[in-house]
Amino acid sequence: MGVGETLEVVYGIHEIFREKGLTLSVAESCTGGLISHYITALPGASAFFEAGVVTYSIESKKRILGVSPEIISTHGVVSEETARDMAEKVRQLTGTSCSISTTGNLGPDVLEDKEAGLVYMAVSTETQTLTREMRFTGDRGEIKESAALAALKLLVEGVA
């Protein structure tokens, strides 16, 4: 993955959101604000980008986003269900037409019996929520960058 590929995807997102009149919010955990950074790296993001929140701890996911404690206790913070709830809740909180979320384990240690590199992401729109499980290799930074790019690509898939 390179900067060129990331900027190409982000440029496409800018075009799609402007053309369709969509708005976007982001709830990030393992990507730590990188998705929001990429979206705002190009001028014009303020036309569609409403908000980005980094809810890194379990408590912030529950308190800020309203993620269901039952989902976290049943499935774990690193789960498809948590990613789905994060995306749906941030979209509802901000009133945007679309949202994206990420949650995962950047490593190096196992978390909730889930290996490093396991990331879940979700894209929520007014009509559907898409989720994806991804497994990445590399160090923390590489996994984080790969996860952010994969989430941006899922966003394109979800709104195209």
Image (spheres, grey):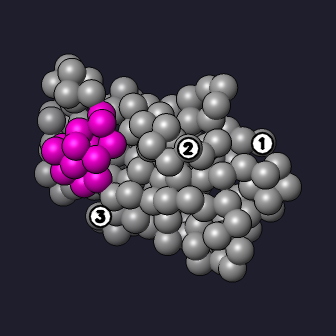
Q: Disc 3 to disc 2, how far (Cα)?
A: 32 Å
Disc 3 marks which residue? Answer: 140
- What label does residue 160 carry, if any? 1
Magenta stretch, main secondary structure class: helix
Q: Amino acid at mark 3?
A: Arg
Count how many numbered circles sit on residues in the image: 3
- What label does residue 37 carry, if any? none
Disc 2 marks which residue? Answer: 95
Q: Residue furthest right?
A: 19
Tell me, yes or no, whether the two marked residues, 1 and 3, touch with CB atoms within 8 Å: no
Q: Which residues are magenta?
A: 55-67
Q: Amino acid at mark 2?
A: Gly
Mark found first going from the N terminus, 2 or 1? 2
Residue at figure coordinates x 66%, y 26% from the top left: 127
Q: Is residue 126 left or right of residue 100?
A: right
Q: Nearer the viewer, residue 133 or 160?
A: 160
Residue 115: % across, % down: 23, 42
Q: Amino acid at mark 1?
A: Ala
Residue at figure coordinates x 20%, y 28% from the top left: 69
Mark found first going from the N terminus, 3 or 2? 2
| Disc 2 versus disc 1: nearer the observer | 2
